[in-house]
Image: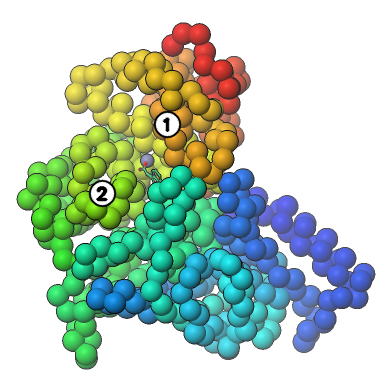
């Protein structure tokens, strides 16, 4: 949705157009639009090919049909986007699957696949600023990705179903899109499954209908902007519970039957934890909430999928629940501009654990800080500069990220620190933000230069002498 930092790519596109004109290499089409292809990646420091240039997605309309018996997915995505340059062609990220057809504004579009890049070339070029609609129809058995750090993500099969998790790149295994956190969009998703198989996604379920062939379709609406890595689908047999949080937010929890009784009490705590976090972080940013608890054996970690985080049963404990719910503010509403800014998610969610423990379990945040300070693994690299993609989810991003915030709190005092936390989540609500946005914002609220603090705690290679 709202994209910042467009100036540089706009300038680049203009330069490329001028060069093409000089070289006489750009065919003039129709009334004189001279489009160029959108970039095939957004040059993320860790994943340069993720995302695509030349357009800004407003909305994804997904229709998915899945058969757990053979693992086959049939999908159509309708993308509503705005061109940010005169476009002759543009890319989507897609891994695996077979593309059957593509259209732009209702007319057939040529398409081509190369690696994880799907290129669509409309019959007519799209002028800068114009909104367009692209559809892609695709099918196949989705294959998960293995990340640089060895963890599995994407479309994962479970006994009798599947779960889709997309951080940082897995969403391209189940739908074509602009898969970078800097392009957030709204979503509507229709999920058609055999009778007796339940399906869940982000947001609120707005419809449930039986198809003429007996399959059942549920429709899910995501009313606030979402980065595609936070999209999820959970398919299988699940037991559900409902509640209300914060006076009006519908809470839907689901648990695989074998872990439903054991997780019921903690699932019941979701409204209270959200109430407590809203007091600390400011208004809850979304119009739906919940959790999904999976049987162990498929997913090795919890993920803060928007409005409805997913957990393997082994990770469904109060600390992890507090962590994933805190991500709804820090990560999901305020989303990292690039993957280098991930500590803005993980450092904040970890600090939310420390704050919760301080306030409700009588363990001072200072104690958590000292424990983290004492562990060598937390000092392997600075939180705002992980050395490689393999290290993105390593302890320094989480624990040293949280130490940055505690150090900030001790430097500016509790009152100003609280104002920074609440103001940060308000100022960048439903937007994308970078590390530099945060340091500038914190200095603005504190009314002083904090350069020494950032240099040592956020960017420094050395462990400071004493906590
Ligand atoms: N972002 C998740 C969390 O901390 C965890 C996560 C996502 C993760 N992908 C991962 C952890 C890959 C390790 C490896 O809430
Ligand atoms: Zn996290």
Dot 2 corresponds to which residue? 311
Q: Where does residue 404 sit, x and y in percent of width and height?
A: 47, 24
Specify the quadrant of the image occupied by residue 278. top left
User: Is 66 rendered above or below residue 451?
Assistant: below
Specify the quadrant of the image occupied by residue 208. bottom left
Q: Where does residue 166 sit, x and y in percent of width and height?
A: 41, 56
* Residue closest to the eye, 168 or 37: 168
Q: Is residue 295 left or right of residue 392?
A: left
Name the residue at 82% across, 67% down. Answer: 17
Q: Where does residue 232 sit, x and y in percent of width and height?
A: 34, 60
Dot 1 corresponds to which residue? 395
Query: Label 1's element?
Result: helix
Query: Label 2's element?
Result: strand
Name the residue at 46% across, 44% down. Answer: 149
Q: Is residue 192 visible?
A: yes
Q: Where does residue 369 sit, x and y in percent of width and height?
A: 37, 19
Contact? badges 1 and 2 (CB < 8 Å): no
Name the residue at 68% across, 67% down. Answer: 38
């Amino acid at each position: 949705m709202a994209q910042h930092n467009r100036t540089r790519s706009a300038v680049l596109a203009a330069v490329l157009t001028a060069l093409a004109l000089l070289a006489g290499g750009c065919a003039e089409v129709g009334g004189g639009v001279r489009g160029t292809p959108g970039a095939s990646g957004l040059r993320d420091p860790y994943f340069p090919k993720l995302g695509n240039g030349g357009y800004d997605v407003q909305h994804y309309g997904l229709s998915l049909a899945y058969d757990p018996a053979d693992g086959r997915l049939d999908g159509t995505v309708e993308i509503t986007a705005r061109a940010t340059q005169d476009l002759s062609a543009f890319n989507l990220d897609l891994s695996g699957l077979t593309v059957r057809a593509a259209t732009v504004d209702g007319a057939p579009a040529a398409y081509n696949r190369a690696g994880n890049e799907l290129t669509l070339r409309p019959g007519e070029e799209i002028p800068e600023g114009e909104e367009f609609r692209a559809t892609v129809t695709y099918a196949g058995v989705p294959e998960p990705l293995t990340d640089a750090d060895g963890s599995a993500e994407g479309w994962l099969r479970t006994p009798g179903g599947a779960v889709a998790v997309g951080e940082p790149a897995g969403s391209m295994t189940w739908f074509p899109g602009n898969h970078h956190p800097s392009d957030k969009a709204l979503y509507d998703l229709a999920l058609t499954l055999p009778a007796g198989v339940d399906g869940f996604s982000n947001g609120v379920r707005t419809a449930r209908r039986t198809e003429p062939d007996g399959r059942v379709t549920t429709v899910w609406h995501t009313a606030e902007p979402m980065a595609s890595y936070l999209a999820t689908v959970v398919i299988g047999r699940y037991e559900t519970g409902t509640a209300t949080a914060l006076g009006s937010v519908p809470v839907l929890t689901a648990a695989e039957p074998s872990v439903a009784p054991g997780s019921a009490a903690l699932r019941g705590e979701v409204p209270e934890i959200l109430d407590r976090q809203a007091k600390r972080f400011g208004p809850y940013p979304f119009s739906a909430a919940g959790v999904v608890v999976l049987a162990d054996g498929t997913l090795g970690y919890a993920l803060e999928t928007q409005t409805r985080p997913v957990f393997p049963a082994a990770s469904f404990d109060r600390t992890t629940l507090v962590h994933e719910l805190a991500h709804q503010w820090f990560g999901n509403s305020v989303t990292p501009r690039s993957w280098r800014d991930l500590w803005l998610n993980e450092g904040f969610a970890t600090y939310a654990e420390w704050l919760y423990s301080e306030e409700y379990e009588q363990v001072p945040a200072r104690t958590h800080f000292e424990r983290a300070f004492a562990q060598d693994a937390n000092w392997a690299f600075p939180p705002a500069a992980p050395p490689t993609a393999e290290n993105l989810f390593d302890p320094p991003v989480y624990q040293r990220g949280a130490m940055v915030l505690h150090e900030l709190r001790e430097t500016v005092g509790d009152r100003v620190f609280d104002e920074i936390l609440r103001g940060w989540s308000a100022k960048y609500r439903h937007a994308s933000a970078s590390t530099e946005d945060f340091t500038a914002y914190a200095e603005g609220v504190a009314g002083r230069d904090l350069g020494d603090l950032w240099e040592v705690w956020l960017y420094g290679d050395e462990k400071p002498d004493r906590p």
